[in-house]
Image (spheres, rainbow, N blue to C red):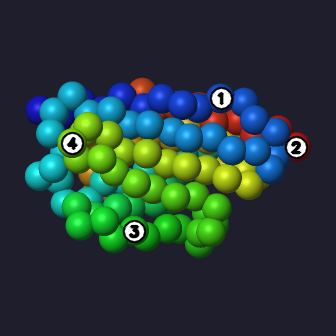
């Protein structure tokens, strides 16, 4: 079973950047699509970026042009480069397969963007 550990979150000013990492304990090569999700206070968890095994990417409109997802199958790691951060990006960020697998949810990493 794969365990996912997210890291790289923190407090940043609006306009700043962060790079999130998602390290998998097992191989993610067999997982066709991996994604980054986020959940802010009082809102449902939403998928913001996904990447297929072949490298195709898709983004939510709210982050398009600012976030970049990538994956390194040799390191079993998925990344999310976040630029031009806005206060509305404040949330706990999680990685998981797409569609998500219940047993794969990790603790997430908190991203807080101050105005």
Residue lying at 42% horizontally and 27% vertically, measured from the top left: 107
Q: Determine the residue positioned at 39% across, 68% down.
A: 57
Q: Is residue 76 above or below residue 70?
A: above
* Location of the N terminus (image quadrant): top left
The alpha-carbon separation of the residues under discs 3 and 1 comes to: 25 Å
Q: Give the residue furthest to the front.
A: 74
- Res 74 label: 4
User: Quadrant of residue 26 in the image?
Assistant: top left
Q: Nearer the viewer, mark 3 or mark 2?
A: 3
Q: Earlier in the sequence, mark 3 or mark 2?
A: 3
For the residues labelled 2 and 4, the Cα–Cα distance comes to: 38 Å
Residue 78 in the image, given as x and y percentages of width and height = 36, 45
x and y, in percent, of residue 73 in the image? 23, 47
**Residue under label 1:** 10
What is the x, y in percent for residue 80?
Answer: 49, 48
Q: What residue is pinned by disc 3? A: 57
Contact flag, marks 2 and 4 (Cβ < 8 Å): no
Are the residues flagged by discs 3 and 2 in contact, CB closer than 8 Å? no
Q: Earlier in the sequence, mark 2 or mark 1?
A: 1
Q: Is residue 46 above or below residue 78?
A: below
Number of other residues with Cα within 10 Å of mark 1, as a class: few under 14, some 14 to 19, many 20 or more: some
Badge number at residue 101: none
Q: Earlier in the sequence, mark 1 or mark 4?
A: 1
Camera-side residue: 27 or 36? 27
Q: Secondary structure at mark 3?
A: strand
Picture coordinates of residue 14 (x, y %)? 82, 46
Determine the CA span between mark 2 and mark 1.
14 Å
Which residue, given by chain and number where applicable, does mark 2 sit on?
115
């Amino acid at each position: 079973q794969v365990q996912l550990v997210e890291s790289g979150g923190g407090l940043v000013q609006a306009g700043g950047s962060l790079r999130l990492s998602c390290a998998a304990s097992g191989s993610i090569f067999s997982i066709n699509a991996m994604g980054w999700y986020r959940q802010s206070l009082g809102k449902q968890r939403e998928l913001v970026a996904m990447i297929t095994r072949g490298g195709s990417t898709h983004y939510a409109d709210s982050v398009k042009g600012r976030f970049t997802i990538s994956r390194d199958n040799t390191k079993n790691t998925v990344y999310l480069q976040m630029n031009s951060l806005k206060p509305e990006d404040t949330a706990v960020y999680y990685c998981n397969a797409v569609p998500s697998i219940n047993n794969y949810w990790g603790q997430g990493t908190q991203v807080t963007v101050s105005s």
